Amino acid sequence: MPFPMSRRLALSGIAALGTCLCLPAAAQDGVQQQASQAEADASLPAVEVVGRRQSGSYHADEASGTKTDLPLRELPQAVRIMSRQTLDDLGATRIDDALDYVGGISRQNNFGGLWDNVAIRGIAGDINSGMPLLLNGFSGNRGFNAPRDTANVERIEFLKGPAASLYGTSEPGGTINVVTKKPLWKAAHSVELYAGTDDFYRTSIDTTGPLGERVAYRLNAAVENRGSFREHVDAQRAIIAPALTWKLSPATRLDYSGEVLRHETPLDRGIVAVGNRLGDVPRSRFLGEPADGDVRVDNQTHQLALEHMFNARWSSRIGLSYKEGSLKGYSTEAQPALASDGRSLPRQRRYRDYASDDVTLQAELIGRLQAGAVAHELLAGMETYRLDFDQRMLRANPTDTSPYAIDVFNPVYGQPRPVPLPNTDTSEDQKNLAFYLQDAMSLGEQWRLLAGVRFDRYDQSLLNNRSGARSQQSPTATSPRLGISYLANAQWTLFANAGKSFRPNNGSSASAAPFDPESGRAAEVGAKWENAAGTLGATLALYDIRKKNVLTADPVNTGFSMAAGEVRSRGMDFDLSGQLSRHWRVNASLAYIDAEVERDNLLETGGRLLNIPRLNGSLLAMYEDALANGTRYGIGGGFTHSASRLGEARTQAQANAGRPAFELPSYTVARLAAYWRLSPTLRLSLDVENLFDKTYYASSFQRTWVSPGNPRTVVLGLQAKF
C-alpha cells in the first residue's frame, strides 16, 4: 500500500529545522540536572510503557493541552484525562470506542462511518469536519480525517469549557487533545494479535529505544480488517506512526511525530425509521449499493517541535505541523423520507473527491517569575496556519422516471445506477494569524488565577469553480478567558471560569455561499476532590453555554448545512477516576444536559439539539490480583447509558403543524473485560462489547440516516513483549 510523501512537507520541515537550530544552546547547571532527571524518568521498565499495561492508573495530575504546569486539582477548569490504561481496559482500537466513558460527551453523526464525531456539553463541532480535536496541541480536525486509531495514542485529554484563548478555533463546550506516544531511552517492544466476531482481525507493533546517545525512536503500526454486522459493509485500515527525539544539547530537544493512515469502507448511512418507529427494518440491513465499493480516506500528518531551555526560568517552543487529507469514492444515500407506500426509499448517488492541506506554525515563550508573594507562569505565543479545502461532488437525484429506490423490507441490489452529474465544486482557502497570552498566577497557598486572551485574524476565500463566483470575508476575534481556584484544603478545590470562543465554518450552503463564523461564550463553576495519595480524583461542574451561527442539517436541501441561529446548553457533568484500593480501579461519569435552539429563522425555537440526551452516564471497574502460581489476572466491566435523543432536526412549521418529533430511544449497554498474564512477557485478553446484545441506535442525522449500535462482539487478544 503506497504512502506518498509531500514535497512541500519536506521543504517546510527543512526550513523549520534551520530556524530551530538558530536558537541559543547555552544552559545553566539547573537545566542540565533537569535533562538528567528526564532521562531517568524515561528509563522505566519496558513492561509498563509498550503494549497493553498490566497495571496502571486511570487518574492523572496534569494535561499538556492546558499549557501550564498547574496541577489539574489547582487548575480553574474541568479536565478529564483518559489514560492509556483506560484505553487498554476498554479494548479501544479507535478513540470512538472510549468516548462514551467521559461525562458530557454525546455521539453525533459519523458521516457514514468515515470520521469520529461527538458533542461536548451539548455543543457539536463543525458539521463539515467533525468534533473539536487537537493532536499534540495542533489542530487535528481541519479538513478530512478518518476515524482516529489508538495504536500511537498515549492519552486523551478532554479540556472542558472554552479553550479559544489558547487554540482559537475551538468550541465553548470543550476541546479534545490527543497526545501521541513518545520515544523512550530504554529498548522495549511489543506485538499484539486480535481476532473477533464479524471477521475482525488486527495486528499491531510498538517498538522504541535509543539509536545513539542523543537520538531515540518509536514506531507504532497496525493493520486491521474489520467485518461488520451490517450487510455488505466492512473496513480495512493501516496506520504507521514513527516518532524521533533528538537531543541537540542538554537544553535543546527536537521531536518529530508522524502518522500515515489509510481507511477504506463503504459509506454507510445506516437504517431508516418507518414513520417514527425504529425496529421495523433490521439493524443489519444496508440500504446503499454494494457495487459502489469503498470510500477511501487518506491522512498524512507530520509534526516537528523544538524546545529550548535558556535557563531555569525561561524556555521556548517552536512547532510546525503539516496535515493532508483526501476522501474519494461513490456512495448511494437515502433521501429524507420514505415514499407514500411506506416501504420504497428514494436514494441519491454521489461521487466525492475531497482534499485538504493544513500547515500550522507555532512559536511560544514560557517564563516563570516571582513578583513579591505572587508566582507567575507566563506564556506568550504566536500561531499562523493556512488551510486549502477543496470539495468536488457529483450527484444524481431520483426522478419520477428514474426513482433509484430500494424496498427497505425486501431490498434488491444491482439495479442500474444513475450517472451523477456535477453538483458542488468549491475551493476554499483559510489563512490565520493569531497572538495569545496566558498568565497562571499562584496567589499564596490557597488561590490560583488563570487569565488569557487570544487575538485572531482570518482571511477566508471561497471560489465556486462551476460559476466562477468568489466570496471573501476577513473576520477578527478576541477570545478572553478568566478563571480562579480556591484550594480549600489538601483535598478540595472550588473553581470558576468564563471565556469566549470563535470558529470559522468550513464548507458552503446550498447556494455555495460561505457561512458566517461561529461565536460562543461559556461559564462554569465546580469543585474538585483528590484523595491524600493522589491516586483517585473527581470533578463536578455546572455550566452555561451560548453559541451563534451554529451549522445544522438543512431540512430543505438534503446533504447541505445551514446556520441554526443561536443555541444554548446548560447542565452538569461529573467524572471520577483512579485507584479505589490495591486491587480496584474505577472510571465513572454522569452528565445532565439541557440543550436547545434559542433563536432561528427555520428550526423550532425551544427545540432540542440533535443527538443530545438529557442524561448519560458510564461506569468502568477493573479488579486485579495474582493466582497461586504467581501469574496475574484482571477482570472487570462496566456500562454506558444514554437517555432518548432528538433524531432529526424539526422546523418551526413542522412543530406548529403538530408533527411529532423523531427521537432515538434510550439505551444501556454493558461490557466485559478480562486478561490473564501467562508470564512477564505474554498476556491473553478478552473484550466483550454489548454483553447482553442490546439493540440500540447510537446517533442519527435524519430518520433515514440512523446509525445502529454494534451487537454483541467478542475479541480475543494475545500480547507479547520482549
Image (cartoon, rainbow, N blue to C red):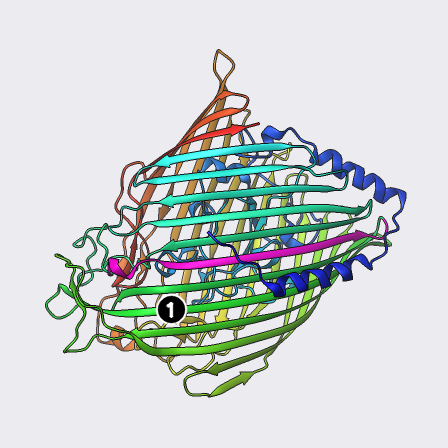
Q: In this rendered view, identify the residue nearer to me: 284 or 488.
A: 284
Q: Is residue 50 above or below residue 365?
A: above
Circle 1: is it few (<14), some (14-19), or many (20+) Cα within 10 Å?
A: some
Pointer 1 residue? 352
Residue 347: x, y in percent?
A: 23, 68
Q: Amino acid at mark 1?
A: Arg
Please give left or right for residue 374 compared with residue 577 in the image. right
At 40% across and 64% down in the image, what residue appears? 328
Confirm whether residue 543 shows in the render.
yes
What residue do we see at 89% from left, 42% from top?
29
Residue 153 shown left or right of residue 394 in the figure: right
Determine the residue located farthest toward the left in the rendered image. 341
- Up the image or down, 537 lies above or below 391; here it is above
Secondary structure character of the magenta stretch overall: strand
Foreground pick, 540 / 311: 311
**596 part of magenta stretch:** no
Give the magenta range: 289-311
